[in-house]
Amino acid sequence: MTRAIRIIGLDPGLRRTGWGVLEAEGSRLVHVACGTIVPPETLPMAERLARLHEGLVEVIRRFAPHEAAVEETFVNMNPASTLKLGQARGVVMLAPAQAGLPVAEYAPLLVKKTVVGAGRAEKQQIRMMIGILLPAADPKTEDAADALAVAVTHAHHRTAPGARLAAAR
């Protein structure tokens, strides 16, 4: 008999960071919770990042995941946007690492392919498949649906040799 593993999936963003928690036991996936952290855009950058960190720390404390998975970011044409997203992504990776969780990273293409079966899937297709894979889930935002998709991807690939765990256990 296998032990259930609680996974938090994270979809990083400075404006909105999605999070989704599920339990995986063998091939069985069960939705636990999901949501979005939205730091006020009126705050200075450092305070927005601090609010993002505080929100993630609270979610991790509340749902006590065993492992974390973060979606890798793509490089934008706008260097300033890419830098800001990178800062948010750093905070998103830091919070679970500080909690002692192993952190895996997955390319958006792999997430889409795992959840939908096609690497060029649209957000709407991801959300639909999350509803099929996790019937109890009702993500209120695309960011939360994407985070659940990252968690599903980790559940399917976590023991594969290519899964990259970045934090010490």
Image (cartoon, helix red, strand yellow):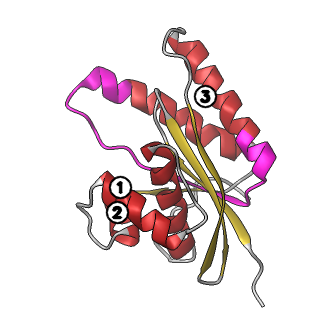
Lower sequence index among marks 3 and 2: 3
Between disc 3 and disc 1, whose residue precedes? 3
What whole-number distance in Å separates the C-alpha atoms at marks 3 and 2? 25 Å
Q: Position of residue 68 (x, y in %)?
A: 62, 55
Q: Position of residue 139 (x, y in %)?
A: 53, 50
**Labelled pair 2, 1 in contact (Cβ < 8 Å):** yes
Choose between 48 and 116: the one closer to the eye: 116
Classify 45 as above or below 126: above
Q: Quadrant of the C terminus?
A: bottom right
Dot 2 surroundings within 10 Å: few (below 14), some, or many (20 or more)? Answer: many
- Is 160 in front, or is 13? 13
Crowding near the residue tagged with mark 3, few <14, some 14–19, many ≥20 C-alpha atoms within 10 Å: many
Q: Quarter-wise, where is residue 138 in the image?
A: bottom right
Residue at 76 percent across and 51 percent down: it is: 63
Rendering coords of residue 134 (x, y %): 55, 68
Whole-angstrom CA distance, mark 2 to mark 1, is 6 Å
Say which element carries label 1: helix
Task: Name the residue that disc number 1 marks.
Answer: 108
Q: Which mark is residue 112?
A: 2
Q: Is residue 132 magenta?
A: no
Question: Which residue was labeled with disc 3?
Answer: 52
Range of magenta residues: 59-83
Q: Categorize mark 1 by other alpha carbons within 10 Å: few (<14), some (14-19), many (20+).
A: many
